[in-house]
Amino acid sequence: MSLRKKLIAGNWKMNKTSADAASLAEEIVAAVGKTTDVDIVVCPPFTSLDAVGKALEGSSIKLGAQNMHPEASGAYTGEISAAMLRSLFAGYVILGHSERRTYFKETDAFINQKTLAALKSELKPILCVGETLAERESGDTLKVVQTQTEQGLEGVSKEQITSVVIAYEPVWAIGTGKVATTEQAQEVHAFIRSLLVKLYGEALAQKVRILYGGSMKPANAPELLAQKDIDGGLIGGAALEARSFVDLIKSAAVAG
Ligand code: 13P
């Protein structure tokens, strides 16, 4: 029996109106809303958080956001604070997704500020790390993952670390249909675990969940989820349809 309960999180990215998002949430609740052997999180766009939160009421499925600003309030046009997310009953927030690093030039230092602000507001960060294809091909995968992990977690205390979820998402595998091999994924997950051991000690490091993300689908999930250090998935495309998302949850339950 693993120390870590598997976690399946859906990142809906910039998809679905509020009404469509609520329908998808209702379908997921109908299929797996009472599941307790796997933690389930759905992360719709900000505009659907309220409607999806209502659809999830009374279920075991948790609500998450896809981003936030580190400041509590102020003149940051277009931004959303941790307290705003908490007021809509979000429990998780995805931070440092590669799409935000690439398209919005988010730095490790800025992502770290968000991580600390999320924890202060009792939001669980899902901190994303991962290398590009060029970085993998030049042999820099572990170096990139180390920098992103260490800088993202700077100042996170021993008391806080078990509230953090890390998601390893190789950029070249996101939305491309190119999934990392189980060996490639497990190697990086074990490496991230070893970094956590150095920073927080063995006992705490064993409690932190490390998710895999990047073209995870019902067909490839069982093998990935069976790896020692793969504690769940952060799912994009396959989370937009109830049937495939539910199949992934079932795979996680089997993998235990
Ligand atoms: P895909 O599952 O569509 O590859 O997306 C993964 C991802 O970016 C989740 O955050």
Image: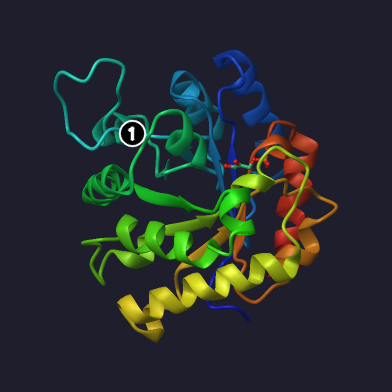
Work out which quarter of the rendered image holds the C terminus and state it.
bottom right
Q: Is residue 76 left or right of residue 230?
A: left
The residue located at (65%, 42%) in the rendering is 174
Q: Residue at x 60, y 46 (%)?
A: 171
Q: Is residue 36 visible?
A: no
- Which x, y percent locates residue 13? 56, 29
Q: Is mark 1 within 8 Å of ligand 1?
A: no
> Residue under circle 1?
68
Q: Is residue 78 visible?
A: yes
Name which residue lies at 65% across and 71% down: 186
How many numbered discs sit on the rendered protein?
Answer: 1
In which quadrant of the rendered view does residue 67 lie? Answer: top left
Q: Is residue 153 left or right of residue 91?
A: left
**Is 136 in front, or is 120?**
136
- Give the farthest residue toward the front: 138
- Type of residue at label 1? Met
Residue 98: x, y in percent?
A: 50, 41
Q: Where does residue 21 sit, x and y in percent of width and height? A: 60, 22
Q: Quadrant of residue 87?
A: top left
Q: Quadrant of the N terminus?
A: bottom right
